[in-house]
Amino acid sequence: AQTVTQSQPEMSVQEAETVTLSCTYDTSENNYYLFWYKQPPSRQMILVIRQEAYKQQNATENRFSVNFQKAAKSFSLKISDSQLGDTAMYFCAYNTDKLIFGTGTRLQVFP
Amino acid sequence: DGGITQSPKYLFRKEGQNVTLSCEQNLNHDAMYWYRQDPGQGLRLIYYSQIVNDFQKGDIAEGYSVSREKKESFPLTVTSAQKNPTAFYLCASSIWGTDTQYFGPGTRLTVL
């Protein structure tokens, strides 16, 4: 079965610091996609970053970057220069024919 | 302005009543999805539709029904057969064959 595991239920970071959220997944597929979604208090799911499994290069979107380790089935999210607006739930997700979500990490950014 | 809209934002239902949640998109996406989110959990797939007049069950379809009469619209009916319907419901859409789904703002359903 395909599963996504986020082992950190809650994290906190001070404004302007860097934080890394962990995600591991289990699959027998070779071609797939990985995502990080952000869910702020408004509860709308917002796409943060996307990684294609066949690409070795780690994806980057402004202050957000991933560390994709295909052999280890690991997909962590690094947020640099954390901002108060980054406070949210963060969900890791895996997609071949459907999206499978982890249980989320609640990130609190403190001033 | 392109996007996905869901209405209402909050919905209250008495036990034994059916209720329909609306989802509309003007992104010209082929595929649409319904997810349920419970506290402390990720999203779980209820139903999805790749094209008009066609839809498939997801992982937790029991007690729900959908229709896809128009490309832009994918309403979800929560029937009285759904034993624990109180949850947050999210609609999403994508271009079929691509991997990225975009989400609406959600509907919070509470059964009284």
Image: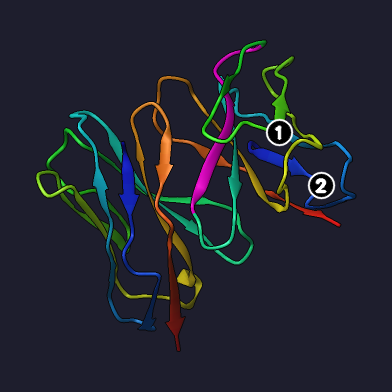
Q: Find residue B8 and name its label.
A: 2
Display coloring? rainbow
The reply to whether the magenta stretch includes residue B31 is no
> What secondary structure do most residues of the magenta stretch adopt?
strand
* Residue B50 located within the stretch drawn in magenta: yes
Left or right relative to A49: residue B107: right
- Residue at 65%, 12% (x, y): give it: B52
Nearest to N terminus: mark 2 or mark 1: 2
Q: Which residue matches tag 1?
A: B63
Looking at the rendering, which quadrant does residue A100 occupy? top left
Q: Where is residue B46 in the image (x, y as percent from the top left)?
A: 59, 34
Q: Residue at x 74, y 29 (%)?
A: B75
Tell me which corner region of the image, top left, top right, bottom left or bottom right, holds residue A18. Answer: bottom left
Quadrant location of the C terminus of chain A?
Answer: bottom left
**Image spot of residue A72 (x, y percent):** 12, 50
Q: Which amino acid does label 2 sit on?
A: Pro
Task: Report the front residue among A99 and A35.
Answer: A99
Which residue is nearer to you in this view: A109 or B3?
A109
- For disc 2, the chain is B
Q: For the point 72% across and 20% down, which residue is it?
A: B67
Q: How far apart are marks 2 and 1 (CA)?
A: 20 Å
Left or right: where A71 falls relative to B63: left
Q: Give the range drawn in magenta.
A: B42-52
**How busy is the neighbourhood of tag 2: few (under 14 within 10 Å), some, or many (20 plus)?**
some
Image coordinates of residue A67 in percent, x first then y, are: 18, 56
